Amino acid sequence: MQRTGEGLEFGMESAGQDSTGTGNGRPAAGEYDVVVIGGGAAGLSGALALARARRTVLVVDAGEPRNAPASHVHNYLGQEGAPPAELYAAGRQEVLQYGAEIVQGRVETVGRIDGGGFSVRLASGDTVRACRILAATGGADRLPDVEGVREHWGTGVLHCPYCHGWEVRDKEIGILAVDMATAVHQALMWRQWSEHVALFLHTAGTPDAEQAEQLAARGIRVVEGEVIRVEGPEKVTGLRLASGALEPCDAVVVFTRVQARAGYLAGVGLEAVEQFAGEIPTGTAVPVKPNGATEVPGVYAAGNVAEPMVQVIASAAAGMSAGAAINMDLITEDIQQAVESAARSVRSG
């Protein structure tokens, strides 16, 4: 697909500057070198790398980052404790200053174009074209069907000790078992942050002999009975059992399976597949190579859409790597086009 013309003109943010000057020309109306789908850590980092490489970039952002319920981002060097909304707002401004464009919206489908490139149709009805696609729409956590879990998700109901462990250190922590292997793993891991860890068996069965030995050795209390509710109108105060008993705790830990938001890629033949950590299912993701390339040439993916377990800083790193790979892919294409054009000139001369 040739890259000539001007940028998109609907409902967008733009720094209003021409970031090109490479001799390749700007894409035509509604055409871009790269459309980045998703405006979280992976998408914005990829867009930043591409915009600084003088590529024309459109970011389509639905405004639904996976960590939106959390109050702060942790383990992000230089941004420790930053609220997610502030981190992404700063990222958008950084991307815009290099001439990229950002539009609020949702992508419904991505399709191939005869002759090369991709069409991207938004829920608004608008369609844009791109030479390359970076999918960075993240994933959605599949939560246990227990009353109060969703209401407290990201504040009092947690999943990752590296994201939230310090904030609940030495507190009463309840592990809500979804299946026994993940629950025991979580209980033993969270024990590093607090001596007061209890494993609630819920409907997951009972630990085997080895698991029971490990739990006992670490002083982790095992609570039998089905959990029917996470108590607390604001902060978590405990877990209510089907027996009526209330077990006090300050935080509840659940294991979630992250489902990639990738349905819009079906039009190019891509779908999310089940992922595992050892024998433990962790969710679904779009398979990618280390540089973010999918099995479909020209389509890349980064962040939780491609890896369920990565944290924000790793998603940002993956987005940057994918952006660099996309730029090199386009450079290779530009070189090939230039060689072919020069050869035609020689033949016609």
Image (cartoon, rainbow, N blue to C red):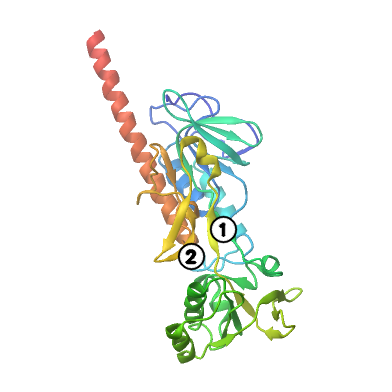
From the viewer's perspective, tell me whether residue 258 is left or right of residue 299: right
Quarter residue 214 falls in: bottom left
Q: Residue at x 55, y 47 (%)?
A: 38
Q: Secondary structure at mark 2?
A: loop
Q: Position of residue 92 (x, y in %)?
A: 56, 49
Locate the C terminus by quadrant: top left
Quarter residue 307 falls in: bottom left
Q: Secondary structure at mark 1?
A: helix
Q: Position of residue 320 (x, y in %)?
A: 42, 50
Q: Which residue is mark 1?
A: 87
Q: Position of residue 29 (x, y in %)?
A: 55, 25
Between disc 1 and disc 2, whose residue precedes? 2
Q: Residue at x 38, y 27 (%)?
A: 23
Res. 8 in view? no
From the viewer's perspective, tell me whether residue 24 is left or right of residue 6: left
Q: Residues within 10 Å of mark 1 (few under 14, many from 20)?
A: some
